[in-house]
Image (cartoon, helix red, strand yellow):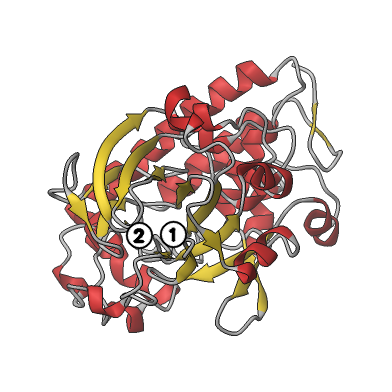
Amino acid sequence: MSSSTTPAGKTLPPDHLDAAATTLDHLTSKANEPDGHTKEHLHAAANSNKAHSLFRSVFPYDSLQEFENEWHMGNYIIDRKTGAKSFEPMSIYVRLGMHLLYYGSEQEKALQWRRTQSLLKEQSLKMGKQYDSPDSRDHIKPFIDSFHLAPSMEEMLQPDWTKYATFNDFFARQIREDARPQAEAADPRVVGSPADCRLTAFPTVDMATKYWIKGFGFTLPRLLGSDALAQKFDGGSLVIARLAPQDYHRWHAPVSGTVESVNEIPGTYYTVNPQAICEEGTLDVFCENRRSVMVIKRTASGSPVIVVAVGAMLVGSIKYNEGITQGVEVRRGQCLGAFYYGGSTVIVLFPKGEVVLDQDLVKNSCEERCETLMRVGGRLGAGPQ
């Protein structure tokens, strides 16, 4: 097999995909130890010394500075409340997952992506099984300590971490509704954030593909699994809400309405990190990953709004709350479902003219090309008068 060239222009040795697979398997096996998935192990920052010692078996580079300059190490995030921009380091396992997207020459890519799909599915199912085990309760406290989540536990329906039966039970913990009040709750025109997340917002799908979604193969029909449904959103708006592993990991209704349909679409388990989304020459991960497409008929306008729950690297499952099914009415801010272990994304689509997205979110997304830190129910915009 020939060597390959990465987006950074670096030539990689021919056996480096095997090395990447071995390293990822080492990380997920290590994660089975009580503290193995903390910031010291699976979630170690990609620019940490621990990460560098592992990456040297995968990436060719001479110095730490060269490595950090040539390879994506994280993302800048804007805090909506303060306007401050900060750097969010990428975790070691996400960096490996991103690299698997880039592997191979043009001739090799189809074969190697199929291999990568099998690898990521295997690792995701492995992690899901590990964290459904009662023994995984030992992982809860180190995770809380590592990500400084103790204050946020007071917001949960079950604030006592010792009451969770497994790590996945804890990971999918549900928040008290009063802990996430809806912005301008009395105004039916207002649209709320579907998650505690890092969010980008685009007035049109074309703007999303111009500024953000760079992987090849992204189309609304592919994302939604339906040409007819996609036609209803031609010229419409798109919001992408990314949940990092340390976030509260459920998603909520952005509008009030009636669930018209839910369509499950099988797929793979690529990372949904922004660097994977924004890098040209990769597969479009949104249209490749496992996802669930919910159509809500909005009460305020009668128009359809789509909520797409997208699984991602190491996410074992996407589960709706009991009673969330076709024909049921949902309220803005109502919890719809949960992602189990890993990072994930919620995409919300609005028909043309259905919503005017708030300008600060659009500016951050298109001009700054940054995600905005949001919480469930935070205002995304509002429909016309």
Tell me if 140 is positioned left or right of 89 in this view.
Answer: left
Where residue 369 appears, as percent x and y from the top left, is 71, 59
Task: Kindly state the secondary structure of the residue where label 2 is placed.
Answer: loop
Q: At x 27% / y 36%, what residue is drawn?
A: 261
Where residue 244 appears, as percent x and y from the top left, is 48, 60
Q: Which of 69 and 319 is in front in this view?
A: 319
Amino acid at circle 2: His
- Label 1 and label 2: CA atoms lie apart by 8 Å
Nearer the camera: disc 1 or disc 2: 2
Q: Name the residue under label 1.
A: 245
Q: Which of 226 and 133 is in front in this view?
A: 226
Where residue 207 appears, as percent x and y from the top left, is 68, 47
Where residue 15 appears, as percent x and y from the top left, is 70, 27
Q: At x 54% / y 44%, what residue is drawn?
A: 271
Q: Is residue 229 above or below residue 77?
A: above
Q: Residues within 10 Å of mark 1 (few under 14, many from 20)?
A: some
From the image, which quarter does the N terminus lie in? Answer: top right
Q: Do the residues labelled 1 and 2 touch (CB within 8 Å)?
A: yes
Q: Is residue 126 above or below residue 40?
A: above
> Is there any visible trace of residue 70 in the rendered image?
yes
Task: Kindly state the secondary structure of the residue where label 1 is placed.
Answer: loop
Counting every numbered tag in the picture gives: 2
Q: Mark 2 points at which residue?
A: 249
Q: In which quarter of the image is residue 151?
A: bottom left
Q: At x 31% / y 75%, what residue is drawn?
A: 186
Amino acid at circle 1: Pro
Q: Quadrant of residue 64?
A: bottom right
Q: In this view, does 181 lie above or below 115?
A: below
